[in-house]
Amino acid sequence: AQKVTQAQTEISVVEKEDVTLDCVYETRDTTYYLFWYKQPPSGELVFLIRRNSFDEQNEISGRYSWNFQKSTSSFNFTITASQVVDSAVYFCALSEVLTSGTYKYIFGTGTRLKVLA
Amino acid sequence: DAMVIQNPRYQVTQFGKPVTLSCSQTLNHNVMYWYQQKSSQAPKLLFHYYDKDFNNEADTPDNFQSRRPNTSFCFLDIRSPGLGDAAMYLCATSSRDRGSYEQYFGPGTRLTVT
């Protein structure tokens, strides 16, 4: 079965600390996509990154970096030098192909990150 | 800017009183989704449209219906809201034909049932 596990329910850090959010997934598909979304208090889900199953290169975007390891079925997200504006709930998601020919997301339960000033 | 718009942002309805939530998009995407997100939970897909084809998730209650009159608009109808239907409802779009797998989400409508 398709599944995404975010074991960390809530993390609190002090501003400028680095923090890593864990994501472990299970899938029967050989081709799939993984995503990270940020959900601030306003409620909108903001797309952060997409990674396909054939691309295991790590990616860095400013203070954000992602570590995809197929061998351990993990797709972890690190924020360097965290800021108060990073406070949000972060969701990891896995694509699942639907019979319609499109796909849906399987979301993890999310990790609430609190960055304290 | 191209975007996904949801109206209203906050909706209060009475127990059993039908309510409609709306979603519009300027992205010209052919797929539109409705998710339900209850407090402190992950979003859960209710159904989606691929062009005009409606696709219901197996566990979506019959109380929830949807309409897509054209590419730009999609509606979520809750025929007889119960207290358990209080949630954030998120609309999302994607473009199946462009090979892109990202879904673009609207700001959500927070539904309260009294």
Image (cartoon, helix red, strand yellow):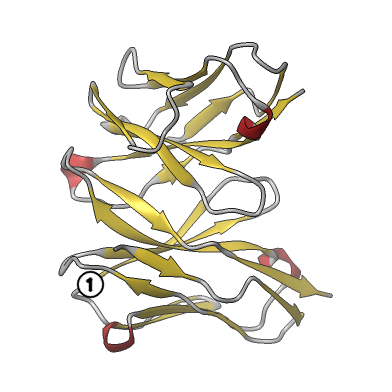
Q: Nearer the viewer, residue B52 or A117?
A: B52
Q: Quadrant of residue B83?
A: top right
Residue at 26%, 31% (x, y): give it. Answer: B30
Q: Is residue B74 visible?
A: no
Kind of residue indicated by mark 1: Ser
Return the residue found at the far right: A117
Q: With B64 as the anchor, is B56 left or right in this view? A: left
Placement of the C terminus of chain A among the 4 image quadrants? bottom right
Q: With B98 as the anchor, is B114 left or right in this view? A: right
Q: How many marks?
A: 1
Position of A113 relative to B14 (above/below):
below
Residue A103 position in % (x across, y down): 26, 47
Q: With B113 as the anchor, is A90 left or right in this view? A: left
Q: Quadrant of residue B66?
A: top left
According to the picture, the residue beneath numbered tag 1 turns out to be A53
Residue at 18%, 65% (x, y): give it. Answer: A29
Residue A100 position in % (x across, y down): 18, 37
Q: Nearer the viewer, residue B110 or A63?
A: B110
Position of B114 relative to A80 (above/below):
above
Position of A71 relative to A77 (above/below):
below
Callout 1 crowding tier (Cα within 10 Å): few <14, some 14–19, many ≥20: some
Q: With A9 as the anchor, is B68 left or right in this view? A: left
Position of A81 relative to B7 (above/below):
below
